[in-house]
Amino acid sequence: MKIVVIGGTGLVGRQLVGDLAGRGHKVVAASPSSRVDSITGEGLAQAFAGAQIVVDVSNAASLAEDEVLAFFGTSATNIAAAARKAGVKHVVVLSIVGTDRLQTSGYFRGKQAQESAVAQSGVPYTIVRATQFFEFLSTIADGYTRDGVAHLPIFAVQPVAAADVAAALADVALSEPVNDVTEIAGPERASVVDFVGTWLGHRDDPRAIVSDEDAGYFGAPADDRTLVPGDGARLLPTRFEAWLAAQPAQEQA
């Protein structure tokens, strides 16, 4: 079976491509570096020719609000149109748990635009909302650091290993479309300050940590419900301690 992975050279994309190929499928890792551009539409028709499944794990290059909205809306619209024309049987989109609850964030509005474009396109689809990746903890720490102090939020999160996300996406891609949203998450729930603080300690990072009950999610108000999955979510196996043990301990901050 031919499967196209949009964003197939990124963190999740590379692992997804390897997983699907390991299951015996012909996989195309599509990205601008392979002359497939979902914004301009260049190369989509050629990449999708003969494909049964398309998985979109692409991400915006900029976090600027206008650019994020333009990227996700335009990209999803072009992908859906090309998939419909090529007769693709299943389009899978990787999104974020809490997208519908965090619409004060420009990035999450972009993800909502992506979801809506696919859902309204008429192509068979599944939207997979995942929680934050363990691999994103350093970015979170840096985003909340001022003058050498990490002012970290106390609201709950339930992060997940990127490798688990890739494996779950492969399972979803090879299943029937649900034409709806499904959620995946890690097996453990704790506060942002607990997860990020443990990560910084593992790295022997010298910055001080302060719990900040007023800190939202990168400027958007958030609470214990905002970024955690619902009761029907699929919980993936890798625990934080096991993931942490596999990471280099002595990184320079």
Image (cartoon, helix red, strand yellow):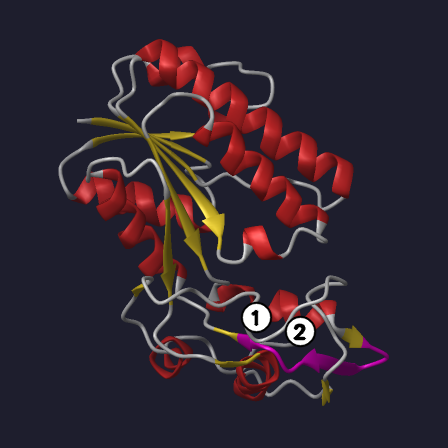
CB contact under 8 Å: marks 2 and 1: yes
- The region drawn magenta spans 146-156
Q: Read off the residue under disc 2.
A: 141
* Magenta segment main secondary structure: strand
What residue is rendered at 57% in x and 41% in y?
A: 112
Distance (Cα) linking label 2 and label 1? 6 Å
Q: Can you give x and y, in whole percent of width and height, for residue 20 in the image? A: 23, 41
What residue is rendered at 19% in x and 40% in y?
A: 175
Label count reads 2
User: Callout 1, which amino acid?
Assistant: Leu
Asked if 143 appears above or below 210 in the picture, the reply is above
Q: Quadrant of the C terminus?
A: bottom right
Q: Residues within 10 Å of mark 1 (few under 14, many from 20)?
A: some
Q: Secondary structure at mark 1?
A: helix
Asked if 53 appears above or below 196 in the picture, the reply is above
> Could you tell me if residue 61 is visible in this image?
yes
Q: Residues within 10 Å of mark 2 (few under 14, many from 20)?
A: many
Q: Can you give x and y, in whole percent of width and height, for residue 114 in the image? A: 54, 35
Q: Quadrant of residue 209?
A: bottom right
Is 67 magenta? The answer is no
Q: Quadrant of the N terminus?
A: top left
Is 154 magenta? The answer is yes
User: Callout 2, which amino acid?
Assistant: Ala
Q: Quadrant of residue 201?
A: bottom right
What residue is rendered at 39% in x and 21% in y?
A: 122
Please tell me which residue lies in front, 110 or 132: 110
Q: Read off the residue under disc 1.
A: 137
